[in-house]
Image (spheres, rainbow, N blue to C red):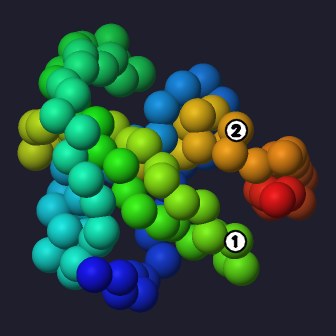
Amino acid sequence: MNRTIEPVRFVFDTGAESFVIGYLLFEELKSKGLAFEDMGIKKTTRGVSGIPFESKVIKISAISIGSYTVKNVYTSVPLIETANSNLLGISFMKKFRDVKWSLNGDKLIFEK
């Protein structure tokens, strides 16, 4: 099932390898029909605080950013309700030919 879901904010994190959807956002997206597959993989993740917590890996069928659609996006989802950061890490950015960031222009540009 594919539905249009309202835009979601993510933190652009050059220090993060993973693409992470926080627990509450994932639950909300699931209730709105997010097309995903649970990969059956659990891993220990460490946030900025350094405290470890368990996450599961899912594959999202498609994510749209502007006019681009990215298919088969692997993401981590924390398994604890208090882990709610949404991080746009390097693994997602590698799906594009180039990603440019402008600090002064407050822009993140994805090149297909």
Name the residue located 10 percent from the left edge and 45 percent from the top edge.
81
Residue 73 percent coordinates (x, y):
48, 50
**Distance from Cα at disc 2 to Cα at disc 1:** 14 Å
Q: Hey, which residue is sitting farthest bottom in the picture?
A: 4
- Dot 1 alpha-carbon crowd within 10 angstroms: few under 14, some 14 to 19, many 20 or more: few
Assign the N terminus to one quadrant of the image. Answer: bottom left
The answer to whether 11 is drawn above or below residue 1 in the figure is above
Which quadrant of the figure has residue 60?
bottom left
Residue 79 percent coordinates (x, y):
13, 37
> In terms of sequence position, does the residue under pointer 2 or pointer 1 come before the other?
1
Residue pointed to by mark 2: 94
Assign the C terminus to one quadrant of the image. Answer: bottom right
The answer to whether 51 is drawn above or below residue 55 in the figure is above
Residue pointed to by mark 1: 68
> Dot 1: what SS?
strand
**Looking at the picture, which amino acid does disc 2 mark?**
Lys
Name the residue located 84 percent from the left edge and 47 percent from the top edge.
97
**Looking at the picture, which amino acid does disc 1 mark?**
Tyr
Name the residue located 16 percent from the left edge and 62 percent from the top edge.
27
